[in-house]
Image: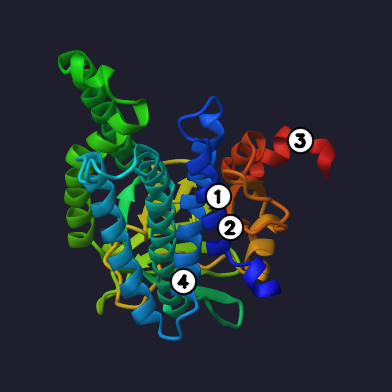
Amino acid sequence: MRALLGHPLLWAVLCGLAALRLLGTNVDFAGFLLCLIAGWLVAHAVVRGLMALRSPGLSFGLHVGVAAAAAAALFLLTRGVIPGAVDASVTAALSFSAVPAAGWIWLTLIGRVSGLVRADSARRTARLVSPDWTRTNDVWELRLPAVALRLSTYRGVVGILFAVAAGVLSVFVVVFSDVAMRMSPLMIVVVLGWLIGLPIYGAILLIARARTVEVLVRVTRGRLVIERTTEEKTDATRVVDLAFGEVRALRWAARDAPTRVEVRPVAGSGVVLLFGLARRPAGMAATLPALPTGLRRRLEEAGLSARASRGGDPRGLSGRDADLLLTRDASASARSLTPVGERDRQAPSAR
């Protein structure tokens, strides 16, 4: 008896019968609400029955079929397929009930599909591996595929992309003003992103993957060296070779897209290693490993202070502590470039 009283179909029938008595009267709005409730209860009972099936494949297949049938029934009801001999109250009750019933069936189907996509994405992410640091005595090393660019070139490309995006958006709003007025701002961004942004991103990705090289990041007791890994070691393979005192800033964007490493020296142009856009081996994640605690402490002892990067915690207490910005203040940078003898003459009292 308890199972019968708690079954949604029983309450759907009761709501439907009550709605038939109220439709066409002075309180027909209450009948309309009861029709909506009855339709949702029927759909809830159907979905609950589908979820109770032991075979997930059969359950999902039947759910797709029921969703298609509900959409077809809703379409046919709008075409007036119910014979005229049927009572008007019954026709109205069926029409009112079909809307929430079809809507709930489709919403639960969309939820199941999105759940399958999330589960598959989580499984694939769990199987991916990130490049990892290796330590030999006092030397930390990290091998990874990357696209090496001057920092000025990287910033110029980003600026051009923002300018192109703003220009395309402005042209679309001005030239196609009638269409733009009928679209929400979010819809405009989505449409332009698919039609224009996606091809541009694809072209950038192809260029980046064509320029991918294997690099080695090596941090010794006092130097930061980044070089292309080739059989013949020459000065041309060195991307970065700086003493710690010559580094003004180091951005380690392990998860902040695009994942990258930025090195800005005290003097000269900076370098960026784009890892997220590079061509990676199968099974390698697009995220960088966090800076090891010992290596990070070594950099901080050399005068680079940690700052949070886009919401990260510089103390390493948050989940985004892998995204860090290590910087040196201006006075320390100027002092690192001053010869030792000159510093002694400028500050004799420091002896």
Circle 3: residue type: Ala
Residue at the spot x=50%, y=65% of the render?
45
Circle 2: residue type: Trp
* Crowding near the residue tagged with mark 4, few <14, some 14–19, many ≥20 C-alpha atoms within 10 Å: few
Query: Is residue 266 something one can see in this rendering?
Result: no
Circle 4: residue type: Ala
Between marks 4 and 3, how big is the CA–CA gap? 59 Å
> Mark 3 vs mark 2: which is more N-terminal?
2
> Are the two marked residues, 2 and 1, in contact with CB atoms closer than 8 angstroms?
yes
- The circle on residue 11 is 2
Left-right relation of 105 to 255: left
Residue that mark 1 sits on: 15
> Mark 4 vs mark 3: which is more N-terminal?
4
Quadrant of the rendered image containing residue 310: top right
Numbered label tally: 4
Residue that mark 4 sits on: 122
Quadrant of the rendered image containing residue 299: bottom right
Residue at the spot x=49%, y=36% of the render?
32
Q: Is mark 3 on a helix, strand or loop?
A: loop
